[in-house]
Image (cartoon, grey):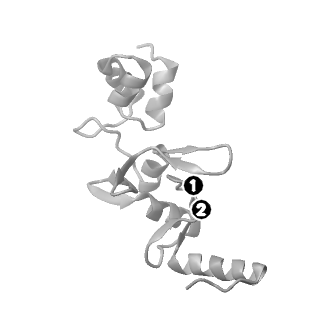
Amino acid sequence: MKIRADIAELLHAGHRDNAIAKQLGACPKTVARARAALGLPTDPAGRTVYDTLEDAFRAHTEPTDNGHLLWTGSFNSGVPTIRHKGHRHSAYLIAYRIGHGHDPQGRCRPDCGRPGCVAPGHVDDGPGRARTRDTYAAIFGEEAAS
C-alpha cells in the first residue's frame, strides 16, 4: 500500500484518524488503513495508544519559535489534560515531571504568561513560584508577594 507522506507524518505525530482525515481532506478509512500498514496501534475507540505518558504528552504539543510549547490536546475546566491507559492526567503535571524529574509540591502551572504553554521549563509548582518571586524582589528591590 502506498501511504501519503502527509498522512504518515501526522500518524507518527500521534494525531487521531478522524482529525487527520478532516485536516487533509482524506477519507477516514484511508487514514485507518495507513495506520494499520505502518503498524501503529489504536485502542478500541480508534485512538492512538502510547507506550508512555511522556510519549502521549509529546504527541499533543507543538513548539513555537520563541521557546513555548503549546498544548494541542484537550482541556478540562481550562487545564490541559490527557487520558493515558484509562486515567486523566494534567499536562502541567507531566511537563513539571519532565522538567524537574520529580512530582510537584501542590499545584503546578506555567509561569511564562503564555496561555496553553506546557513547556517543561515554564511550568513550576508553588514553592518554585515563591522562589521566583523572591528572586525578582531581590533583584528589583520590591517586597516579595505573599
Residue placed most toward the observer, 42 or 112: 112
Image quarter (top left, top right, bottom left or bottom right) of the N terminus = top left
The residue wearing badge 2 is: 122
Residue at the spot of label 1: 114
Tag 1 or tag 2, which sits nearer the N-term?
1
For image coordinates 23% across by 38% down, the residue present is: 45
Q: Is residue 30 above or below residue 105?
A: above
The amino acid at mark 2 is His
Q: Residue 111 lies in what quarter of the image?
A: bottom right
Mark 2 against mark 1, which lies toward the viewer? 1
- Residue 142: x and y in percent read 71, 83
- The image position of residue 144, as x and y in percent, is 64, 85
Q: For numbered disc 2, what is the local secondary structure?
A: helix
Q: At x 67% / y 86%, what residue is drawn?
A: 143
Residue 64 percent across, percent down from the top left: 62, 44
Q: Quadrant of residue 46?
A: top left
Label 2 to label 1: alpha-carbon separation: 9 Å
| Residue 116 sits above or below residue 100 on the image | above
Left or right: residue 65 versus residue 31 is right
Q: Residues within 10 Å of mark 2 (few under 14, many from 20)?
A: many
Residue at x 41%, y 45% (from the top left corner): 73
Residue 55 rendering spot, x and y as whole percentages: 46, 49
Under circle 1, the secondary element is loop
Q: Residue at x 31, y 37 (%)?
A: 42
Q: Marks 1 and 2: in contact by CB < 8 Å?
A: yes
